[in-house]
Amino acid sequence: MSNSMVFRYDVDGDDFTLAGEISSKVKKRLKQLGLPPETIRKVAIAMYEAEINMVIHANGGTITVEVSPETIHIIFADRGPGIPDIDKAMEEGFSTASHEVRELGFGAGMGLPNIKKNSDKMTIDTKVGEGTTIELWMEVC
Amino acid sequence: MELKKVQEILDATVYTGGDRLEEMQVMEACGSDLMSDVLAFVKEQGLLLTGLQNLQVVRTAEMMDMEAIVFVRGKVPNEEMIAAAERMEMVLMTTELPMFTACGLLYENGLHGGKAVEDGE
Ligand SMILES: Nc1ncnc2c1ncn2[C@@H]1O[C@H](COP(=O)(O)OP(=O)(O)OP(=O)(O)O)[C@@H](O)[C@H]1O
Ligand SMILES: [Mg+2]
């Protein structure tokens, strides 16, 4: 597509307090581009959940956001431990988050279901010991 | 409800956005210590009451387009949180009251909780 834009970011896996910076940047960008608030909200929620997952479960990774007039396509790629059982991970309430993460208000096992809910299409490609790639598509509504 | 009224009802100390309290209105509020829940269920609520004190609380509120956060039971936002909230033009305040009482007082004065996402659609 001629008028699509691609943004690429590295996510630092060391510092949980920094998690969300990329989502915040992208949210501002989409606002500047004048996308509809409902679309921006969906992207912001899904991105923030996936970005946090990358930090707390996979020690960081990269996020690529492709914005076209009709669709927003986001790729989250990490080289973390991978997800052994995707069906289980997608269940509400399933979490392997640490005690520290729970104390900060996360780790309820709501992230992946929430990402799915806020996207029009979601795919998870994962291999134990190699990493996880999650792709999302949101229609611009 | 005007944020000024929220501040008065809770006798709260304001850390950011103090000059805008009269202009800002919230229609609904949400009380939670679980950011996972806030991200999954908040819809229109513009005000978050929480007993958690870390930067992710501010980020979560940002993602959900919330206008203000009240920290309950005397939790004071740190410098990082204040700087972030200032950039986002978000109001931060602290009340000495515990969560249940703070929510109860606001509710009694007409600020309600709204619906969870699933009911609302
Ligand atoms: N990028 C990832 N790499 C490895 N494991 C992952 C990744 N993302 C999710 N998981 C696994 O899937 C589980 C469920 O993820 P989900 O986001 O739904 O919940 P959570 O992150 O544990 O808690 P919450 O999202 O409510 O804070 C995680 O606990 C973790 O075991
Ligand atoms: Mg998660």
Image: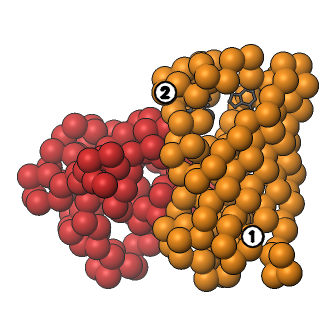
Name the element at disc 1: strand
State the residue at coordinates (73%, 59%). A73
Mark 2 Cβ inside 8 Å of ligand 1: yes
Where in the figure is residue B98, as x and y percent of width and height? 27, 37
Residue behind mark 1: A67
Q: Which mark is residue A98?
A: none
* Chain for colour orange: A
Q: Looking at the image, can residue A45 be seen?
A: no
Mark 1 Cβ inside 8 Å of ligand 1: no
Q: Indicate the chain on which mark 2 is placed.
A: A
Where in the figure is residue B32, as x and y percent of width and height? 37, 40
Say what amino acid the circle numbered 2 marks.
Glu
- A63 or B110: nearer the eye? A63
Where in the figure is residue A131, as x and y percent of width and height? 86, 29
Check the rendered structure and report the hue given to chain B: red
Looking at marks 1 and 2 on the same chain, the residue that comes earlier in the sequence is marked by: 1
Q: Looking at the image, can residue A123 be seen?
A: yes
Residue behind mark 2: A92
Using a 10 Å C-alpha cutoff, classify the residue at mark 1 as few (fewer than 14 neighbours), some (14 to 19) or many (20 or more). Answer: many
Residue A127 figure quarter? top right
Mark 1 to mark 2: distance in Å? 29 Å
